[in-house]
Image (cartoon, rainbow, N blue to C red):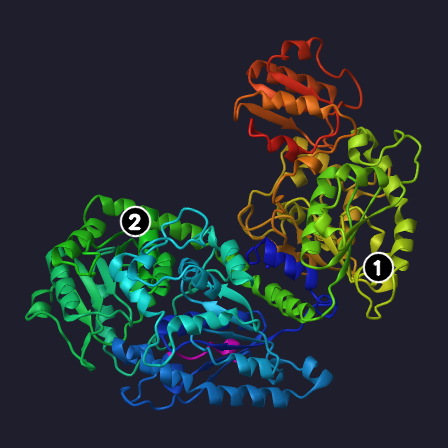
Amino acid sequence: MAKYPSPNQAMAAIIDVATSAAASSPPQLHIVVFPWLAFGHMIPFLELSKRLARRGHAVTFISTPRNAARLGAIPPELLARLRIVSLDLPAVDGLPNGAESTADVPQEKIGLLKKAFDGLAVPFAGLIADICTNAGDGDAAINATGFSRKPDWIILDFAQYWIWPIADEHEIPCAMFSIVPATMVAFIGPKSQNSAHPRSKTEDYMVQPPWIPFPANIAYRRHEAEWIATTFKPNASGVADMNRFWEVERPQCRLIIYRSCPEVEPQLFPILTDLFAKPAVPAGLLVFPEIPRDAAAACDKSDETFTPAMEWLDKQPDKSVIYVALGSEAPLTSDHVRELALGLELADVKFIWAFRAPSHDGVRMIDLPDGFESRIAARGLVCTKWVPQLRVLAHRAVGGFLTHCGWGSTVESFRFGHPLVMLPFITDQGLIAQAMAARGIGVEVARNYDDGSFHRGDVAAAVRRVMVETDGKTFARNAKELHDVLRDKERQEMYLSELKPAMAATREVATTASSPRPLHIVVFPWLAFGHMIPFLELSKRLARRGHAVTFVSTPRNVVRLGAIPPELSVRLRVVSLNLPAVDGLPEGAESTTDVPPDKIELFKIAFDGLAAQFASLIGGNGEDDGSTGFSRKPDWIIQDVVQNWTGSIAEEHKIPCASFNIFPAAMVAFLGPKKENLAHPRTKTEDYMVKPPWITFPANLAFRRHEAEWIATMFKPNASGVADIDRFWSIEHPCCRLIIYRSCLEAEPPMSPILTDLFAKPALPAGLLIFPEIVDDDAVIVSDQSFLPAIEWLDEKPDKSVIYVALGSEAPVTADHVRELAFGLELADVNFIWAIRPPSHGAFLPNGFESCVAHAGWCARSGYRSCACLRIVRSGVS
């Protein structure tokens, strides 16, 4: 679950979901979660842990004693499923006494904190070994639950480059949780791309990397580029940050989870999946569902210094205060602090500043301008201790946020819809600031981009622009609009719900992929070219991955689908079954193209007649005895929605099935499972004109009346003797282990978690299966040569001047439809080519139509493949 797997990775997941994992509802998992020791990491990791625990999983959260205390108590209702295990951080020379997080050490000592963190490898290995030993072996280990169960997954951060031998020893798959945005990970790129395109100087980080194939503002300014370049070099820990990160390319890391979503970063998840050759799964923004009233849940209560600050905020007017916080790792200098302080003073607005003093020679110093605090006492407050940021941002008096644009802080601002004043320093912050400015939700403080310096006047101007001037209303409105989109709790929860099927699929992918034998997959589509073509494309892609694919169709369709590419002929074979004759069908009809719409149900009777031949084909393969290729017993059958008889054949031979839906996931969700339809019966046309009750989030999933009247017929038996919906519901057969659908995140909202829950089996997008290229020799399905003049006609037309008209082979087109469409094309007075299929009854085309439009139009009556026309550059619109 692109993307959420992209087409390539989703394909791997689809192929290799193991029978044992998909055969029944998988058990609740035991997940070990282990973040880096920065609150910007620990807090979202803990929020992820809480949400996993709320879904019934046992979660072991790893940290250190002081951090565990500062993170606050676990909610009582989660105590049975979420535990925090503390590991003692080793002492390292040069670190302050008691330092356990980046909040406790100056910026120049972060490398030493990583060195101490690396010292947790041994106690972590001991913890995992103890858990695995106590879980036991064999069935006992498999059936164990809760914390007594061997960990099913380890979710780690970027820093644990030493974790892989531990995970490997105990055969535990890992996932990396990235708390930086997908944009940052894309900019970094995998090690292979960095080797192919080395970045050796600062300027190399000031341009978009070549592996990002679309126009994007993904590049650093000089002062930011100078910092990012340092992450590629070893630091005081002895290891470069990039070398820590690149360890996620190991095979033990099965997927990368992102604290993001397509609404915020719409283009990046498929690219990341391809770049790192593993699924890129958005977990949503993990914004806190509510702000805890108990301050102990949000901050370190070792002192009471924050209480006066809240009391001060309570006295301020609504939206009158700007909150200022630059995170715990910003490399602030005394100059930065001075100019920021004097800029806030010049701005003459109310503010509350969570001030972390910069350091000098390792000594932390309060470095505010002389007299600053007394001068601003009437309208400003400086807090030098821990500040519970969420509580401040949630306060009614706060109307803006001056931020370093760390991803965690930016996400928290989304939660409350505050406009931003942006002052980025390191890591992903510059990229985020540029993206937020482009969205119009704030303004960046002007600065010298060569050295990163800024002036008090620029700070004041930016603050006033957001908090006082007219532009501020626009920023606030845009921030509110983004807030409204992202506060859709159900949609954000969908992303997290995606994790379990993704984990199940990718874990079994690795298990199966490690086998020396490729799979044998039988692929059997319904006999409509709108089905056969994507099924064949899926087959080709499976074959390119080394699997043996048997594609099943009928003799005439096999010819019309074209030759198999020579390089795939050893792994992809086409097997023809002879379609039985049925009274009332045209002679030689083997696809929906060959029969009028009112005969489609008779055609399904003929298709059902293939059951015995298909059973013989499946039974004729060898047993699972070590054989390979086509001699191997099928590992999977990928079927269409029409074969309600495949399940019994598969069950007899103990072969799992997958249902491949060529229509969008939204349609599958609208149809819904049988149990939901029984619970909420739809007995009249109007019932199909509203969103079904099992779709619990806002969506435009409903039909118009004329569409609803047609969809209602699916729920009634037809001339084939079986209602189409009963054919569709065969995907609920126990032998059907997963649902594949031809879609992706970019094409429609993520539906995998909804479909997975509705049908109680993994639902995975396969991508759009767009043809990689159109080859003239096999791009056209032609029963005669009548298409060649049409191509020659197209060749004579100017670029983008022709509209291609095609309504598919199963549309119930009437003579009235044809007449009105024809007259409409004539009235439009544009060039067109119309792949026309005659209606079942009545006149074909209006008298004289073809002669009237001969100068501009071409009516083609033979079988066509749309991509053959669409590939011609003269076709501008479809």
Instruction: Please state which of residues 672 and 659 is positioned toward the viewer in this rendering.
Output: 659
Instruction: Please state which of residues 579 and 368 is positioned toward the viewer in this rendering.
Output: 579
Q: Mark 1 points at which residue?
A: 650
Residue 128 occupies quadrant: bottom right
Q: Locate residue 331 relative to residue 657 in the image: left or right.
A: left
Q: Which of marks 1 and 2 is in front?
A: 1
Residue type at mark 1?
A: Ala
Is 436 magenta? The answer is no
Q: In which quarter of the image is the N terminus?
A: bottom right
Magenta: main secondary structure equals loop
Earlier along the polypeptide chain: callout 1 or callout 2?
Answer: 2
Image spot of residue 170 (x, y percent): 60, 83
Q: Locate residue 650 relative to residue 485 in the image: left or right.
A: right
Instruction: Please state which of residues 440 and 221 is positioned toward the viewer in this rendering.
Output: 221
Q: Locate residue 270 relative to residue 865 in the image: left or right.
A: left
Does any portion of residue 715 appear in the rendered image? yes
Q: Quadrant of the C terminus?
A: top right
Per the rendered image, the range of residues in magenta is: 71-79
Instruction: Please state which of residues 684 and 491 is positioned toward the viewer in this rendering.
Output: 491
Question: Is disc 1 surrounded by few (<14), some (14 to 19) or many (20+) residues within 10 Å?
Answer: many
Q: Is residue 360 above or below residue 286?
A: below
Q: Is residue 374 above or below residue 649?
A: below
Helix, strand or loop at label 2? It is: helix
Q: Mark 2 points at which residue?
A: 476
Residue type at mark 2?
A: Ala
Question: Is disc 2 surrounded by few (<14), some (14 to 19) or many (20+) residues within 10 Å?
Answer: many
Q: Which residue shows up at 79% across the image and 58% down it?
A: 733
Helix, strand or loop at label 1? It is: helix
Real-space Cα separation, disc 1 to disc 2, in angstroms = 58 Å
Image spot of residue 771 (x, y percent): 63, 43
Image spot of residue 393 (x, y percent): 31, 62
Does any portion of residue 300 appear in the rendered image? no
